Image: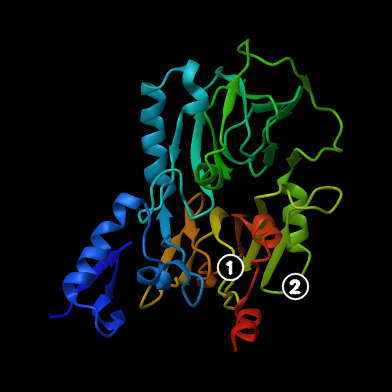
Amino acid sequence: MSTTTTVSGAATNRSQMRTNGTSELDEEGFYASLPARHVEPLWLQMSQLVPPSPNPAATPSLWPYSEIYSALKRAGDIVSAEHAERRVLMLVNPSLKAPCTTDSIYAGLQLVLPHETAPAHRHVAFALRFIIEGSRGFTAVSGEKIMMERGDIILTPSWQWHDHGNEGSDPVIWLDGLDLPVFSLLRLNFARNYAEDRYTSTTRISEDSDVVFKWAPVEKALRSGKESHARYDYKTKAGKHLSATLSAQAERISAGSSTSESQSTLSYVYHVVEGEGHSTILSPNADKPQTIAWSSKDTFAVPAWSRLTHTCTLSEGNAFLVAINDRPMVEALGLLKDAASFSALVD
């Protein structure tokens, strides 16, 4: 009789590992004795813990803006202004649990209603915000008040006091991107509320800031070339990534064109700034590619090590995408690989 043990979702045939002279009864007794000692047999889990190639748990996923927007509007009726900093719908990957949009990136859509100000607070997690819609919204970071405009990326670095508000007459909505999955894994995430509702701030006057990145110069850079696909990597004025964990990029895809297929150990949360198209994603755990059709303001997740192609289906013009990526931490860990470098490494 063949004995099979399931560990972490993987079935391993134990009888194939049994040494000569060991009975099945002896083997059963051995394995049954391990939990009380708080130990587990590595040999039954090796293939799961050390797979032959990158093996993310996340799956390609789409969050259509029309659906999220209607739910956010309802949240505005339910969640009070005092809790506006929590009026967020987390984009939870269906193969994972909150706070994971990919294995390493958290994303959510936040709503601040007219004349609201979310209480000031700070947290160790890094955050970036891409402004989707609304005017006269603001974020104040360490005393610097930054007025929001559509397409801006605004940072709240780790452990900086900040609050958010809306001085306009229309709702303001943005996409949050944080490194919460990493902090949740390490159990090192914590936060503090400020003693007062507001942290004293002054409206930013200087353009020399590493906290806000306006859309206009990014779009100009993307349009400057004649190629059908262009990419812009967000950097600080010192030429560094936006943080030690997460950064961002923007892409332009001309009407009727597709990007070259890419594959890397980075994961992405994409947001459609404008345009229509689809992305073909073959994730590591899938048998066949998945096609995600997207339009303006939709958000979608691309797991690490996916084979990825974007296509703009417009008859004229361009599609513009912004993506939150985990490049800084993947690079820092020495894990950044693409298909070519991985092949050279393992061959």
Hey, which quadrant is residue 321 in on the image?
Answer: bottom right
Q: Which amino acid, mark 1?
A: Thr
Question: Is 41 placed left or right of 84 in the picture?
Answer: left
Q: How many marks?
A: 2
Tell me if residue 342 comes above or below residue 230 in the rendering.
Answer: below
Secondary structure of residue under mark 1: loop
Task: Give the residue furthest to the top.
Answer: 196
Question: If you read the primary sequence from the N terminus, does the residue marked by circle 2 or circle 1 appear first?
Answer: 2
Residue 334 x %, y %: 68, 65
Tell me, yes or no, if residue 285 can be seen here: no
Q: Which amino acid, mark 2?
A: Lys
- Which residue lies at the image location 64% right of the left edge and 82% below the top edge? 345
Residue for badge 2: 226
Tell me if residue 199 comes above or below residue 101 in the rendering.
Answer: above
Residue 277 x %, y %: 49, 65
Residue 14 x %, y %: 26, 76
**Residues under labels 2 and 1: Cα distance?**
29 Å
Residue 41 x %, y %: 37, 65
Task: Give the residue furthest to the left.
Answer: 1
**Quadrant containing the N terminus in the rendered view:** bottom left
Tell me, yes or no, if residue 347 can be seen here: yes
Residue for badge 1: 265
Tell me if residue 149 comes above or below residue 300 in the rendering.
Answer: above
Q: Badge 2 local density, few (<14 within 10 Å), some, or many (20+)?
A: few
- 259 or 192, which is in the foreground? 192
